[in-house]
Amino acid sequence: MTSTVTAPVSLRNRLLRHVLVPVAVMWLVASVLVVSVAGYFTQQAFDRALVDDAYAVASHVRRTAALGDEGLELTLSAQEMGTLLFDQSESLFFAVMRPDGSLLAGHPGLRPALPDDKARSAPKFDVFDYQNLHLRTVTIYRQQPAEFFVVMAQTTTSRDRLMQRLFTFSVAPLLLLLGWLALWLMRAIDDELRPLVALEQAVEERDAHDLTPVPVSTSTRDVERLGRAINALLTRIARGVQAQREFSGNVAHELRTPLAGIRALADYGLRHDDPAVWREQLQGIADSQERASHLVDQLLALALADESRQQLVKAPMALDAVVRDSVMRFLPRADALGVDLGADVSDEPTGQPVRVLAHQALIEGVLNNLLDNALRYGLASEGERRVTVMLRADANTVTLSVLDNGPGVSPEQLRCLTRRWVQGAAGEALKQGSGLGLAIVSEYARLMNARVSLHNESPSGLRVSLVFERLPQNA
């Protein structure tokens, strides 16, 4: 069984429908009301004339002395009656009837609409089919000179024709106005939708690799907002594509050296039969692999930071526990290098830890990179080697710092050390790393709305600090 998919209605047709249908319904209702009111007053006018004719006939009914007290007669001749009831477009019928229903004068077969006893003074209207004609009748009751009824009937051709003309002249202008309104709305809607059509064509004709902003018309605020939203989306996509390109290029560029070194070590070992040479080359391969893995981890961290710009969720957290956990992870490595690694954490006077709005994984990433850099490049050449993680708080800020007592960094390098692929003198001399650690720290800090600062310690060493806004204790 196949299912048919109905094509969506165009925006122009939908707007026309939403405008014309309510207008047509309202105008139709208004026309019906106007025709009904006009028909009511028209009926009143015709009925008034019919009542006047009935009273005119009743005024010519006289008592006849020869017939006694109950004797009545109509004193009009046939010619006089024809003159009285003359109508150019309608046929008139009448009957003068006694209270017992017997005909005194007029057309036999007319049926009186007998009024109620309490309302005999008011005319009584009715409709009646007589001689294949549809009649409008009125019955009046008279007590002088004796009791009798007058039934006056009239065909309804004139009033029906008048109602038809009223309806026609009400509906015809309505249809013409609706047609004119539809044409005017179609042109107006087409003019208003032209910027939207231009935006649609601009997006359809755009090459998949072209992520520059599309031209946006400022004719209407809605189209302008839509264009800005599309351009903002293109900007985000361009940033994502650029980040992927940078990541791919960085990986290709930075992994080329360690992979080439691994290949060279393997080729050298294969050319020798001495197991000692093999062991030496295998150790070199293991060291190169470790550096390559560290580089990949850093590149992935940067790529993750780029993707987290729009979807990172921060939460209130205490920094002291994260600091202690990070120090404990690096203690075995620090002991192997003979480094005094410690933490200097100051809590509130009440014993409560200081709290900031941050992300635990990013804080751990910051400390991992700073401690790794300190244990690689921040070691004193002689004397005591010391690395300290420090946490300080004042009324408005919380400062997380990692400081060492190594050779420090020149003032020129301090200004650009947080850029990608920039290394200090110690890193360049040791031929280790790739200059991404502090770039990752800077990117993570930006995601958490923190400030990064680098200062040389006295007499030697480097301090890298992150400054957060402090949260109230009840937050």
Image: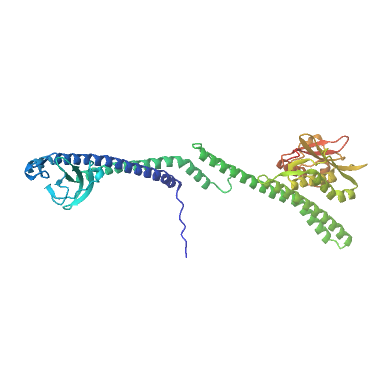
Q: In which quarter of the image is residue 378?
A: top right
Q: State the quadrant of the C terminus.
A: top right
On screen, residue 258 above or below 118: below
Q: Taking the image as drawn, is residue 300 in sight?
A: yes
- The image quarter containing residue 451 is top right
Residue at (39, 46) in percent of width and height: 21
Q: In this view, does 208 lie to the left or right of 357?
A: left
Q: Which colour scheme is used?
A: rainbow
Lateral position of residue 120 relative to residue 452, left or right: left
Residue nearest the viewer, comparing 134 with 286: 134
The residue sitting at the left extreme is 66
| Of the pair 302 and 466, the residue shown nearer to us | 466
**Does residue 421 show up?**
no
Rendering coords of residue 14 (x, y %): 44, 47
Kindly give the residue lying farthest to the front in the view shown.
69
| Farthest-out residue, bottom | 1
**192 or 354: which is nearer to us?**
354
- Quarter of the image holding residue 473? top right
